[in-house]
Image: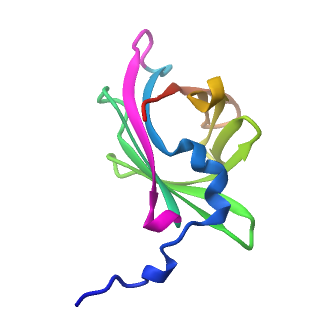
Amino acid sequence: MATTIGYEAAIPNPALKPLSFLVGEWRTEGSHPQLPGKTLNGRTSFAWSDGGAFLVMRSEIDEPDIPSGIGIFGTDDDAKECSMLYFDERGVSRRYMVALRSDQWHWWRDTPGFSQRFTARLLDGGTRMVGQGELNQGDRWEPDLQLTYTRLA
């Protein structure tokens, strides 16, 4: 009889509990400065993995210029930090820091030559989020992907 290796660790991570409001399926609608006048429709889901040890985000937008991606959220107890490891269909792999502050979900990366940040505000009792991304490829922040999330399930 086969057993799952490490099954004892497949338990909820209490440090991720503040992100539990994300769990479920969301419809997204947004825009991107490099695609003026185009409405970007898509979907994003958040689900617990390994009994709640991690939170997994999967996203796709019905526009070939915007990549589908996967993010895995985890924490570091010693550093008291939450981070997201991100990977998309282009083969891009990045690490973002993550924070939940009152009514905002925020992720960012500060890397010389290409930094990004995204802040989404919770609205309507948590059934909607309005988010704005920014990027910095030199010495100033510029608008990036804007998304509104509406809870489906």
Point 70% across, 61% down: residue: 81
Looking at the image, the residue that sits furthest to the bottom is 1
Q: Is residue 67 left or right of residue 10?
A: left
Looking at the image, the residue that sits furthest to the left is 1
Q: Give x and y (percent) for residue 150.
A: 49, 26
Point 69% across, 48% down: residue: 99
Name the foreground residue: 119 vs 2: 2
Can residue 123 be seen at all in this image of the molecule?
no
Point 58% across, 49% down: residue: 20
Q: What quarter of the picture does the C terminus occupy?
A: top left
Name the foreground residue: 78 vs 8: 8
Image height of 1 relative to 33, above or below: below
Q: Give x and y (percent) for residue 77.
A: 70, 71
Q: In this figure, which colouring scheme has been used for the structure?
A: rainbow
Q: Is residue 120 left or right of residue 25?
A: right
Q: Give x and y (percent) for residue 37.
A: 43, 9
Q: Is residue 121 left or right of residue 50?
A: right
Q: What quarter of the picture does the N terminus occupy?
A: bottom left
Can residue 26 be seen at all in this image of the molecule?
yes
Find the magenta span and give its range. 35-52
Q: Is residue 35 left or right of residue 63?
A: right
- Name the quadrant containing residue 15: bottom right
Point 62% across, 58% down: residue: 16
Q: Total label count? A: 0
Image height of 27 relative to 39, above or below: below
Would you say residue 114 sits in the magenta stretch?
A: no
